[in-house]
Amino acid sequence: MADKFNLIECNDDDVVEFEGKMYRIGQIRKALHKSSESSLAFKLQQNLEDENISINDSGENIFTTGVECQILNLGSTTWKKGNFKFKISIEFYVEPEEDTKSNSSENVTFSPEPESPLDDLRRMLNEEV
């Protein structure tokens, strides 16, 4: 998706529209947070167990404070203690400007985010990969 669309940052007061209904990003984040503390955490725990992965946790901490564990990185000779945590995010990808102009029949104007001085460096690094 990153090849066709550009990721933009969303603030809680930004608004998205789905089939004529508009919602603030903050409302969606709030619902997502509630889900990650209950039913989503429970379902994840079940799916992990289905894969024979046992994480000793009630399920809710895995999205909030994390679960204590250790990691052995490739090439490392020692274990590192830390917390394992799942992070769920909301991302919004916009169509490239050329496609938006040619496909849009509406006169919608918005000011794009100012380009970061690091954008050229990021593009160069992405081209090398």
Image (cartoon, grey):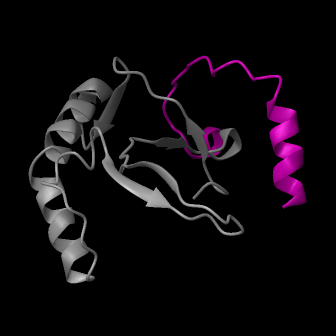
- Is 116 in the magenta? yes
Choose top left, top right, bottom left or bottom right for residue 14.
top left
Q: Position of residue 106 (x, y in %)?
A: 48, 31
Front-lying residue, 58 or 91: 58
Q: Can residue 21 be seen in this view?
A: no
Reply above or below: 79 against 108: below
Q: Is residue 34 left or right of residue 19?
A: left
Q: Where is residue 57 in the image (x, y as percent from the top left)?
A: 18, 56
Q: In this view, does 108 lie to the left or right of 29?
A: right
Q: Can residue 55 be seen in this view?
A: yes
Q: In which quarter of the image is the N terminus?
A: bottom right
Q: Position of residue 33 (x, y in %)?
A: 21, 37
Q: At 67% across and 57% down in the image, what residue appears?
A: 3
- Is 124 in the magenta? yes
Q: Where is residue 68 in the image (x, y as percent from the top left)?
A: 33, 50
Q: Quadrant of the C terminus?
A: bottom right
Magenta residues? 100-129
